[in-house]
Image (cartoon, helix red, strand yellow):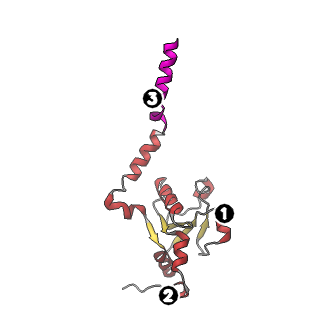
Amino acid sequence: MKKYLIAIVVASIFSGPALAYDKALAESYEKFFSAFEEKNVPKASRRIPADKVVEMIKKGDDLVIIDVRTRKEQSVLGVTYEHTLQMAMNEIFQEENLRQIPTDKKVILTCKAGLRCAIMAIALHHVGFDNMYSMKGGITAMNHYLSDKTAFSPPPKNP
């Protein structure tokens, strides 16, 4: 009996790490992140600088911004763009919120500094939203970019 108990303990010690993850989920991520090869990383990460986001808004591009900051953060400083959804990071994957996310236009996620929105854009892209982008540097970058000159100037002319 003692030998069986020792065998079970030893087997559980050595098999624990091998069984400590969700294999199907890991395979799903492996497939998704395979696009992140060295030459594709800038394109695969789908990050848009704040000045380009302002340019798209001024040109009237059909886009939606999703603010993924916490409700408290959103209450202190908000995004006032007409087509903005306020969905805190911990609420996005609730079914009623996923249904609000458009699939027929560019969706740009933002947060305070760009990390949370990049993570959420990748996660949403992973579950099937192919139109997800994140604002590089988040609202902080937007605040640094905007001034009287940049905020109220007309969009650049296309050649």
Q: Nearer the viewer, residue 133 or 150?
A: 150
Q: Residue at x 60, y 63 (%)?
A: 69
Do labels 1 and 2 touch, CB within 8 Å?
no
Residue 137 point in image, percent of width and height: 50, 69
Q: Nearer the viewer, residue 75 or 59?
A: 75
Membership of 2 in magenta stretch: yes
The residue singled out by tag 1 in the image is 71
Residue 154: numbered disc: 2
Q: Disc 1 residue type?
A: Arg
CA distance separating discs 1 and 3: 44 Å
Disc on the earlier residue, 1 or 2:
1
Residue 96 point in image, percent of width and height: 63, 56
**Please, is residue 117 above or below residue 158 in the view?**
above
Q: Disc 3 residue type?
A: Phe
Q: Disc 2 residue type?
A: Pro
Q: Residue at x 44, y 85 (%)?
A: 156
Disc on the earlier residue, 2 or 3:
3
Q: Is residue 93 left or right of residue 34?
A: right
Residue 109: numbered disc: none
The dominant secondary structure in magenta is helix
Q: Residues within 10 Å of mark 1 (few under 14, many from 20)?
A: some
- Indicate which label's residue lies in the foreground, 1 or 2: 1
**Please, is residue 143 above or below residue 38 in the view?**
below
The residue singled out by tag 3 in the image is 14
Membership of 130 in magenta stretch: no
Q: What secondary structure is marked by label 3?
A: helix
Q: Is residue 46 left or right of residue 141?
A: left
CA distance separating discs 1 and 2: 32 Å
Q: What secondary structure is marked by label 2?
A: loop
CA distance separating discs 2 and 3: 64 Å
Residue bounds of the magenta highlight:
1-20
- Indicate which label's residue lies in the foreground, 1 or 3: 3
